[in-house]
Image: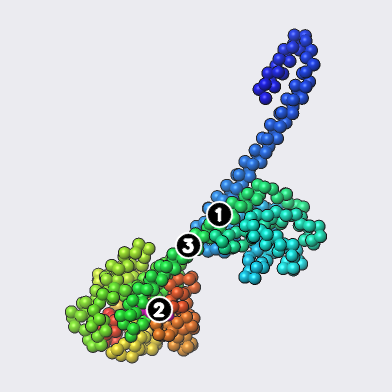
Amino acid sequence: MKELLQKIESARRSVQGGQVDVELDALLGQLTDQTGRVMREHEGMAEELLGLYEQLGAVFEIARKLPQVRDENEVVQLLRNTVEESFSRHLVGVVWPKDDAEFDFRLEWWPKCDPRQCEWLNSLLRDSVAEASILVRDVPKTECLAGLIQVMTAPVACGSDLVCILVIGRNDAALELRASDMSLLEILCTFSGDLIANIRLHHQLRQISVDLVLSLVCAIDQKDPYTSGHSMRVGHYAKSLGQELGQNAEELQMLEWSALLHDVGKIGIRDDVLKKAGKLTEEEFNHIKEHPVRSFEVVSRVPQLRAALDGIRHHHERYDGKGYPDGLKGEGIPLQARVIQVADIFDALTSSRSYRKAFDWQKALSIIAEESGTVVDPHLGAVFTKMIRRRFENDPQAWEAMTRYGQSSGGGAADAETAGATSTDGGASDAAASSGAGASTAAGASAATGAGGEQTGS
């Protein structure tokens, strides 16, 4: 280009000197050609830069909404919404794989003809999956596809597992699908696949945590099978009461885990005290009162369970300040502990002990009412009473199932479902219901029938 400009300058001087350079027109023609080439290159660069900008914008939009995403379906929906924004003139849908190597069509915009009978699209989807790549194909004129002239398919995979296939349809109103569109879709699908992989890993790690919690609960159950299932039922009652109070998902999970582990420190309590059928001596009573702090010390070593420690340490505090280990009073007792306390007392009263038979749920509620304001939080006691009456008053079968829930000998998932005790968020209750794992409580701490005396050994 520089050389061409020098030749033009030389020709201009020749013309100014009165000499007519016959090559001037040719040089000007070359200049025009090269200028046009440069302009076309710049246009291509501009288009490429615009495509990169769209890619970055789309990825940024997904990243911005990541805190709202909690499961795989939400990732796919976020991907679809983002693609619909980027391909606003095109038709966007999601196809889900089925076990029989076919596909579950969810394309609202697809032609009215049964899409399962559209072998052309099925073939395109199979090819896209087999090649693990984005494919763009023109729709054959022989296919009656309601004006669609081009289709792009993009598989979303998590490792070797196919999650879904994104399908983009183009009609006459939309721009032709380009290589830059394929590049954008590849970035979005890869990013989404990585997000799903992270979600699955998180769920696996969370399940490991749940299994470890249940292992601790089972260890306590082995200490005293007589009260098998106590911690599981306390976990259910506490979580249900938390739901009545409007707690969020994270608070409910920590509440449930706190309730499940509230007695884990009893693994350090002597068997002769833990299983004693008669009245405890003062020394024995002081020994068993150590279990909340022992439980606290065990669980405090797990950083992920720090939010569950309040309920573990303080579930034996009393509303009047006469509880242990710290003598907290009223609303100075953490809410998590006050919730677990009500659940703990109720299950202790409705469970058989070596020194007495179980009370029915109506009698247990009446005892809690008598102790409201002294042992239990009066507001929580009232909310809990209302919840239990609503659940069991007209359903004896549900109550019978609840008494078996969490026991290591029977009372598994079926009882949990009958009693309404299965967790709805895939938390510890789900795993417990399927495993039948239970926990233990001291069987003979006190022969008292009041809520305060009963909870001493629960």
Give the residue type at disc 3: Leu
Label 3: how many Cα within 10 Å (few below 14, some 14–19, many 20+): few
Residue that label 2 marks? 437
Q: Residue at x 77, y 18 (%)?
A: 24
**Quarter in which the C terminus is drawn:** bottom left
Residue that label 1 marks? 191
- Distance between the alpha carbons at the discs numbered 3 and 2: 24 Å
Q: Residue at x 32, y 67 (%)?
A: 299
- Distance between the alpha carbons at the discs numbered 1 and 2: 39 Å
Q: Earlier in the sequence, mark 1 or mark 3?
A: 1
Label 1: how many Cα within 10 Å (few below 14, some 14–19, many 20+): some
Asked if the residue at tag 3 contacts the one at tag 1, i.e. Cβ–Cβ closer than 8 Å, the answer is no
Quarter of the image where one finds residue 221: bottom left
Residues shaded magenta: 436-441
Q: Residue at x 47, y 80 (%)?
A: 413
Give the residue type at disc 1: Phe
Give the residue type at disc 2: Ala
**Quarter in which the N terminus is drawn:** top right
Q: Earlier in the sequence, mark 3 or mark 2?
A: 3
Q: Earlier in the sequence, mark 1 or mark 2?
A: 1
Asked if the residue at tag 2 contacts the one at tag 3, i.e. Cβ–Cβ closer than 8 Å, the answer is no
Residue that label 3 marks? 201
Residue 402 part of the magenta-drawn span: no
Quarter of the image where one finds residue 343: bottom left
Closer-to-camera residue (273/218): 218
Q: Is residue 162 visible?
A: yes
Give residue 50's position: percent from left, percent from top: 63, 42
Give residue 398's position: percent from left, percent from top: 47, 85
Tally of numbered tags: 3
Give residue 85's position: percent from left, percent from top: 64, 53
